[in-house]
Image (cartoon, rainbow, N blue to C red):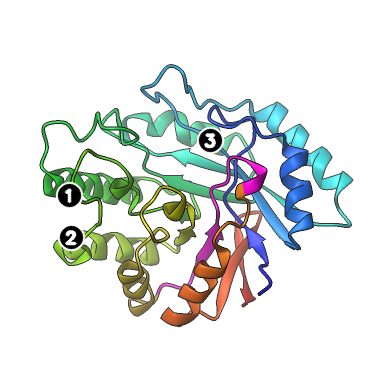
Amino acid sequence: MKFYADYHMHTNFSSDSDANIEDMIETAISLGLKEIAITDHLDYQYPDPEFPFLLDYDAYSQKIAQMQEKYSKKIIIRKGIEFGLQAHVKKETDAFYQNGTFDFVIGSTHCVKGLELYGNSFYQGKTQHDAYLEYFEDLYNNVKIYNSFDVYGHIDYVNRYGDYNNRNLNYTEFQESIDEILKLLIQKGKGIEINTSGIKYGLGYVHPKIEILKRYKQLGGEIITVGSDAHAPNRIASNFKEAYELLHSVGFQAITVFEKQQPRFIDI
């Protein structure tokens, strides 16, 4: 099975990656990918001082432009970014977005009300139901107030972490909240991603779960990208076979790619 594009990957421009951008590109070429989007992190006021998640836009843009020229005959390289969205940093995030140019923007929820979802700090003192519901309510608010993204990343990210006996998200339990998110995304012309890193993190499935993906399709959702969330070359296009099979099983016939934030559909 041939895979067209990996639309979620990080390099050493992100605080949590040591990957050299050329190593990432060379690996993508060796895997036969036709297109990639580099989507390094920008998360204002991320609570862990070891991971500031700030991005030097000028250096980043210059490096990607160099890579686009160097590899122009081998692979399409899109300049992307992954914004960590929170209501209290909207002014700063919007200013960064408006002062730059991008081919592709992922919006993600990595923190809720200043508490990071990675680890256990957000979940302490909360039942699993209450924690997950608070996450989805916050994510809905981000979709409502932000326009500076093209797809929402790993929308069931909340079930990666938390010191619970079972991290398996029960879609039915949160269907009302999730449906409202999906409807608003579609209404605003935004999409979602299949993020295969859920398998890496031991969930046994990609983000989002198949029930959410089915519902997105039922509600009329069409814009969907596929990304590995790779932070190292050996994770590029990881578990894409499962992702493509899942897309087909739900009824998607195409994935989405972007240029200057304009979507284009590629048959799969």
Per the rendering, the mark at residue 133 is 1
In x, y percent, where is residue 225?
A: 54, 62
Taking the spot 36% from the left edge, 42% from the top edge, the residue there is 109
* Pointer 2 local density, CA inside 10 Å: few below 14, some 14–19, many at least 20: some
Mark 1–mark 3 distance (CA, rounded to whole Å): 25 Å
Task: Pick whichever of labels 3 and 2 is earlier in the sequence.
Answer: 3
- Could you say which is closer to the camera, residue 247 or residue 114? 247
The stretch in magenta equals 221-234
Residue 153 appears in view? no
Is 19 left or right of 75, judged from the image as shown? left
Label 2: element kind: helix
Q: Secondary structure at mark 1?
A: helix
Label 1–label 2 contact, CB within 8 A: yes
**Quadrant of the frame with the C terminus:** bottom right
The type of residue carrying mark 3 is His
Where residue 237 appears, as percent x and y from the top left, is: 61, 57
Mark 2 lies on residue: 174
Residue 142 image offset from top left, x and y in percent: 33, 45
Residue 154 vs residue 264: left or right? left
Q: How many marks?
A: 3
Q: Residue at x 31, y 73 (%)?
A: 215
Kindly identify which residue carries mark 3.
41
Q: Earlier in the sequence, mark 1 or mark 2?
A: 1
Q: Amino acid at mark 2?
A: Phe
As drawn, 155 above or below 114: below
